[in-house]
Image: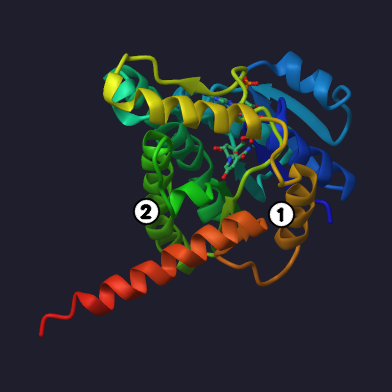
Amino acid sequence: MDRVWLITGASRGLGCEIARAALDAGETVAATARSADAAREALGGEHGRLHVLPLDITDAVAANAVAAETIKRVGAIDVLVNNAGYAELGYFETFSDAAVRRQFEVNLFGTMNVARAVAPHMRARRSGLIVTISSVSGLVSNAGGAVYSASKFAVEGWMEGFAQELAPLGVRSLLVEPGMLRTDFMDRKSANFGSIDTPDYAEAITQYRAFVNEANGNQPGDPRQLAARIVTLASQSEVPSRLVFGDDARQWASAKVDQLRQEIARSADR
Ligand code: NJP
């Protein structure tokens, strides 16, 4: 294969692994990151098939410029990986309005910025694949994950509809819902934690923080394995609309589907 991938958040974590896996498969990669230097360092320097471009996804003008620059340099974008994101972790009432908005600014509106920059090019060519790194938290929410889940549920709702708008024009979509992956995601390097003092939740929050500290670095999911899976799926003529990755994610998603089925059945009007 020799297609062009544009990947956001390629400086570390899953985005970096997807860039590596695509390069290993012989693809050309436009790796984007808030710090181009960090991405260059993580990916071993630019070469003929690796272009590194700075992009903070919250900057719509920059997203357009990066899409245009990629097409100018290498002629096309075949696969967009909308990967960049982070989590506001903690109980809802411990977050300021600004923190909640920041979560949506990156995970939803930033992701939309990049899709908006690339989709016209894919539509014009009647070809392309948009891979959106959502989360199992986009299907299931729980205490401590309300704000992050709200942003990923929004990503799911947006992309599920947008995919149907794009499909007749030859542009495909893959929504990825990973479980817990061993990246910096739960670390203070990436995650923010609610800080408004709310005594009613004090004990629950202490337990939640202990869970996060324990899980950080010990997550069951291997980002390399997921990256390889995404690169393989992207090379197939039939791409599924969803990939739920990891035993933990499949268990949570299945339990949610079972619960929904029961609640729908109980909701019968008569
Ligand atoms: O996390 P991490 P992951 N503009 O923290 C970048 C989802 N996910 O690889 O901070 C551009 O190692 C950030 O850049 P920088 C998750 O929601 C994860 O696990 O500048 N980039 C870094 O490259 C996210 O959508 C888990 O170095 C921005 C990257 O994002 C995706 O997986 C589970 C940015 C984050 O790397 C990748 O996260 C799940 C911005 N404004 C879903 N803000 C999991 N790990 O458990 C952040 O279900 N970045």
Q: Secondary structure at mark 1?
A: helix
Residue 46 image offset from top left, x and y in percent: 85, 24
Left or right for 66, reference 74 = left
Residue 134 at x, y percent in the picture: 52, 47
Residue that label 1 marks: 230
What residue occupies the far bottom of the structure in this picture?
270
Residue ID at (66%, 59%):
247
Q: Residue furthest left?
A: 270
What residue is shown at x 62% (from left), y 33% (from top)? 8
The residue beneath circle 2 is 157
Alpha-carbon span between mark 2 and mark 1: 21 Å
Residue type, label 1: Ile
Nearest to the observer: residue 170 or residue 222: 222
Q: Is residue 55 left or right of residue 204?
A: right
* Rendering colour mode: rainbow
Label 2 SS: helix
N-terminal label among 2 and 1 = 2
Q: Amino acid at mark 2?
A: Gly
Q: Position of residue 28 (x, y in %)?
A: 80, 42
Task: Tell me if the residue at label 1 has its CB under 8 Å from ligand 1.
Answer: no
